[in-house]
Amino acid sequence: MRKAFLIVLAMVLGFSLQAKHKKYKKQHKSGTGIVSVRLHRPGCFGRCPAYIIDINSAGLATYSALRNNADTGEFTKNAGTKKAEEIFNQILATRIDTCMNEYKSPSPDLPGLIITVTYKDSVKTISNANYGSPVLRLLAEKMDAIVGGKTDKTWKKVKEYK
């Protein structure tokens, strides 16, 4: 009797979780649920580069080189909707919305990593993401690859920082 009860309970919970997952996928379908993603590397007390990378659902990328970069200022380029879709799908697949809002840094001098995902109806910000789940570091690497050291000439400077 007890085994039968546990089996029925497991089935009910399984169906409930499956329904919630389908609802989540429908709400956050790539291109409709995520508006933009921001990667912010605030630097450190030394010579670490400080910059921000934003990419929106249309594929427009903005690179704000704040300090300790080869060039400072704000740059834009069209990274393409395909690149935005890849990043947004990675966010959805790895369920970044379930990560903690802040991870503890072992030292205040180490460079930070802040990831902000803007959905149509909410915003998820993760501070010190480099000390969290490995999927957060993979997302950061994918976004850093958009800039690619800013070696290509497709970036257009739109603002000068002093």
Image: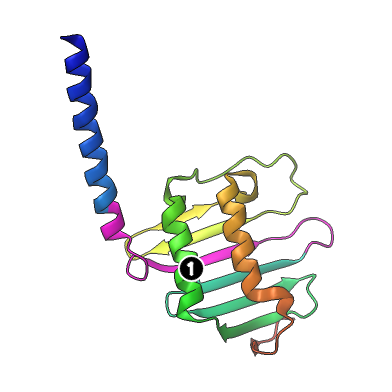
Residue at the spot of label 1: 86
Q: How many marks?
A: 1
The residue under the point 19% across, 10% down is 2
The quadrant holding residue 124 is: bottom left
The residue under the point 43% across, 63% down is 89
The residue under the point 68% across, 42% down is 105
- Colour mapping used in the image: rainbow
Looking at the rendering, in which quadrant would you find the C terminus? Answer: bottom right
Q: Position of residue 92 (x, y in %)?
A: 41, 57
Q: Position of residue 120 (x, y in %)?
A: 33, 66
Q: Is residue 44 left or right of residue 147?
A: right
Q: Is residue 70 left or right of residue 28?
A: right
The residue under the point 46% across, 58% down is 91
Looking at the rendering, in which quadrant would you find the N terminus? Answer: top left
Please rate how many residues cluster around mark 1, counting C-alpha atoms within 10 Å: few if below 14, some from 14 to 19, many from 20: few
Instruction: Residue type at mark 1: give it.
Output: Glu
Q: Is residue 9 above or below residue 40?
A: above
Q: Is residue 25 magenta?
A: yes
The quadrant holding residue 78 is: bottom right
Q: Position of residue 7 (x, y in %)?
A: 21, 22
Q: Is residue 62 magenta?
A: no
In the foreground, 56 or 13: 13
Q: Is residue 127 left or right of residue 85?
A: right
Residue sitting farthest toward the top: 1
Q: Is residue 91 left or right of residue 72?
A: left
Q: Which residues are magenta?
A: 24-48
Disc 1 secondary structure class = helix
Q: Position of residue 137 (x, y in %)?
A: 62, 53
